[in-house]
Amino acid sequence: MKRILHYAYWGISEGALIFIAVNIIGRMIAGSGFTEYIEADFTKIALSSIGIAFFYVFPAILYEYDIPLTLATALHFIIGTAAFCVILIPSGHLQGKSIIMALAASVLAFAIIWIAFYISGKRDEKRINGAIRKKKPGHESGL
C-alpha cells in the first residue's frame, strides 16, 4: 500500500509541477498571452495536467514487479498515452493536427525520460555491484 501511495503522490506532484513550470516559463518567454487559455477554465486545465502526469508516472510501479522489461515498458507507455488521449481529446484541448503533434511530443518525451531513468538505473547497478565485489572475502587476492 505504501508503494502505491508513493507512486500516486509522485504522479500528482509531477503533474502539478509540470503545469506550473510550463506556464511560468511560457509566460516569461511569450508574455502574458501564453497563460490566457488558463483563465477560461483553470480547474479543468490544472486537473487535466495532474491527471495526465499521474497516468504516466503511476504505471512505473510495474517495474517493481517480476515482469519482462519490454512488457512493463509497453504497458507503461500504453496506459500513459491512453490517459493522455482520454483526458485531452474530449475536453477540446487537442483538435485536428494538434493531436498528432501532441502525441509525437508525448512519445518523444516518454522515450527521453525512460532512457534517462534506464541509464541511471544501470549506472546505479554497476556502482552497487562494484561495492559488493569489493566487500566479498578474497577480493584482494584476486579470487
Image (cartoon, grey):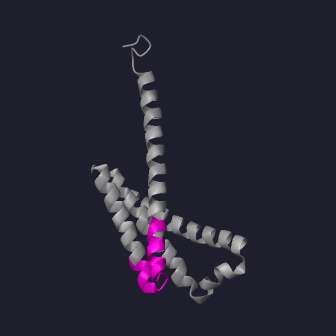
Q: Is residue 66 above or below residue 19?
A: above
The residue sitting at the front extreme is 97
Nearer the observer, 82 or 9: 82
**In this picture, residue 75 sits left or right of residue 26:** left
Residue at 46% across / 44% down in the picture? 119
The residue sitting at the bottom extreme is 40
Residue 57 in view here: yes
Nearer the observer, 116 or 139: 116
Task: Indicate the position of residue 12 as horizontal and vertical percent values.
Answer: 49, 68
Nearer the observer, 2 or 9: 9
Q: Is residue 83 above or below residue 14?
A: below
Q: Quadrant of residue 96?
A: bottom left
Q: Is residue 101 magenta?
A: yes
**In this picture, residue 140 sits left or right of residue 76:** right
By secondary structure, the bulk of the magenta-drawn segment is best described as helix
Task: Indicate the position of residue 103 as horizontal and vertical percent values.
Answer: 44, 70
Q: Is residue 4 above or below residue 140?
A: below
The region drawn magenta spans 86-106
Q: Is residue 16 above or below residue 96?
A: above
Q: Quadrant of residue 121?
A: top left
Task: Indicate the position of residue 10 as horizontal and vertical percent values.
Answer: 48, 61
Number of marks in the rendered image: 0
Task: Indicate the position of residue 49 as horizontal and vertical percent values.
Answer: 51, 74
Q: Is residue 27 magenta?
A: no
Residue 8 in view here: no
Q: Quadrant of residue 130?
A: top left
Residue at 32% across / 61% down in the picture? 75
**Image quadrant for the C terminus?**
top left
Residue at 48% across / 55% down in the picture? 112
**Image quadrant for the N terminus?**
bottom left
